[in-house]
Image: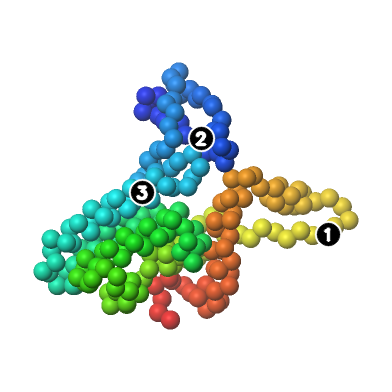
Amino acid sequence: MHFNAEKTEEIISSTKRKTPNHQFNVCRGRCGNTDDHKHLGIILDEQLKFHGHIKEVISKAIRGIGLIHPSKFLSIYLLDQIYNLHVRPHLDYWDIVYHKYNPEMKLDFTRKLEQVQYSAALAVTGAWRGTSSRRLNEELGWECIYLRRWCRRMCHFFSLKNTATPAYLFDEIPVERNAQYSLRRDLECSQLIKLSALQVRIFKVFSLNGIYWIQISGTLTHLRSSRANY
């Protein structure tokens, strides 16, 4: 397999303030350095904060809302379909990756995404700005964007647990045992416990959602399908 060095970009993910300066060569050519890179529709940056991706998501969603305003004479049902076709897909794409535990809605990107849906709800219903977002969501049958991301991540946990995925994706870290002699398993456990700074950040993002998954009733976690009626 041959790579084109001119079309290959290099991005280094690091938690350090000053990113290490490395130069990689591919097929006798140097890769170009970049601060962010778009791969499969998601923009990756050096610190994996997804600021660029969220900014692009908001921009595309606002353009979709612009399609609703000229169609304000249509029924709410048709306007809701326009929202589902041209706005919501942008808000849903890769949302389980950049989602963060923030039930109090204090993070800046959480408030911005909620504001986008609020603007869409005003355009669909024709309500005045200042109307309660909760009442608008109830009338349209929508849920807040944060809750939607959380539910989609729980569905992702369900898929990992109940479909044909590698066991290491959902197996729990084994508990340490006290033994009179050294075991190879003890060495493996010690290697798992020693996490790098980047791994600790990733663990903090996903651990709270994993805890919620464990705390959910066993009736839900052992369903045969996420579409089952209960």
Residue 124's quadrant in the figure? bottom left
List the single residue furthest toward the right. 180
Q: Earlier in the sequence, mark 1 or mark 2?
A: 2
Residue type at tag 2: Ile
Q: In the figure, 3 relative to 106: above or below?
A: above
Spatial separation of the CA atoms under disc 3 and disc 1: 50 Å
- 5 versus 157 height, above or below: above
Q: Which residue bears the numbered disc 1?
A: 178
Label 1: element kind? loop
In primary-sequence order, the first of circles 3 and 1 is 3
Q: Is residue 82 above or below residue 228?
A: above
Indicate which disc, 3 or 2, sits on the residue closer to the N terminus: 2
Name the residue that disc number 2 marks: 12
Which residue extends farthest front? 130
Q: Secondary structure at mark 3?
A: helix
Number of disc labels: 3
Whole-number angstrom distance, CA of label 1 to CA of label 2: 40 Å
Q: Quadrant of the C terminus?
A: bottom left
Residue 147 visible in the displayed image: yes
| Residue at numbered disc 3 | 55
Task: Tell me whether the residue at label 3 lies in contact with that at label 2, contact meaning CB atoms closer than 8 angstroms.
Answer: no
- Residue 200, how many percent across, how many down? 62, 50
Dot in front, 3 or 1 = 3
- Judged from this view, the residue extending furthest toward the top is 28
The answer to whether residue 137 shows anywhere in this view is no
Report x, y in % for residue 105.
Answer: 46, 64
Q: Position of residue 76 (x, y in %)?
A: 18, 72
x 57%, y 41%: residue: 15
Q: Residue furthest bottom?
A: 230
Residue at 27%, 63% in the rendered image: 119
In the rendered structure, find residue 153 and report the number of the disc placed on it. none
Residue closest to the eye, 23 or 49: 49
